[in-house]
Amino acid sequence: MIDEHDREREHDHGEEEDQLELELDTQSQIFLEMRQQNLDLLRIAAQVAGYTGDHGPLKPGDLKQALKNIWEVYAEFYSWIDPEESGEEEDEEE
């Protein structure tokens, strides 16, 4: 009887560990997919801002403005994708 109870407890504990591992794997996968989407969006923003392809190397003084332009395009695109999160950021800035 004690052995059965111990086995049940071990079995339940094993299931909990499996569920926790699956949840962590799922969360990790979602995190990685979101990071990839952000990188893709950043690449598109750079293209739209005109800083890819035939664009020559930036001059030292142009880098800050180029990054600002890319960020503005990126932020606009991101607000279309996730309006709730971009709204929270605007509230924090105020």
Image (cartoon, rainbow, N blue to C red):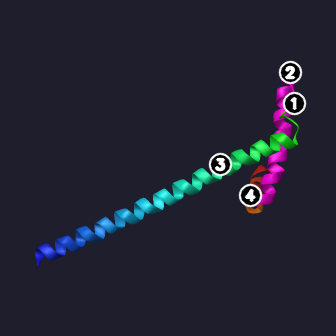
Residue 59, label in figure: 2
Which residues fall within the magenta stretch? 54-82
Q: Is 76 in the magenta?
A: yes
Of tags 4 and 1, the one toward the viewer is 1
Seen at 41% across and 59% down, the residue is 21
Q: Which residue is mark 3?
A: 36
Q: Position of residue 16 (x, y in %)?
A: 35, 67
SS at circle 4? helix
Badge 2: few (under 14), some or many (20 or more) residues near its Cα, within 10 Å?
A: few
Q: How far is mark 3 from mark 1, CA to CA?
A: 25 Å
Q: Report the residue marked by disc 4.
A: 88
Real-space Cα separation, disc 4 to disc 1, in angstroms: 37 Å
- The amino acid type, in three-letter code, at marker 4 is Glu
> Is residue 53 or residue 83 the one in the foreground?
53
* Image coords of residue 3 (percent x, y): 12, 73
Label 1 belongs to which residue?
54
Residue 86 placed where, x, y %?
A: 76, 56
Q: Are marks 4 and 3 in contact (CB under 8 Å)?
A: no
Relative placement, left or right, of 55 versus 31 is right
**What SS does tag 2 mark?**
loop
Could you tell me residue 88's position as x and y percent?
Answer: 74, 58
Please tell me whether residue 79 is drawn above or below residue 46 in the rendered image: below
Q: Is residue 41 visible?
A: yes
Q: Mark 2 to mark 4: distance in Å?
A: 35 Å
Whether residue 71 is visible here, answered yes or no, is: no
Label 3: element kind: helix
User: Label 1: how many residues lie within 10 Å, few (<14), some (14-19) or many (20+)?
Assistant: few
Disc 2 marks which amino acid?
Lys
Q: Earlier in the sequence, mark 4 or mark 1?
A: 1
Q: Amino acid at mark 1?
A: Asp
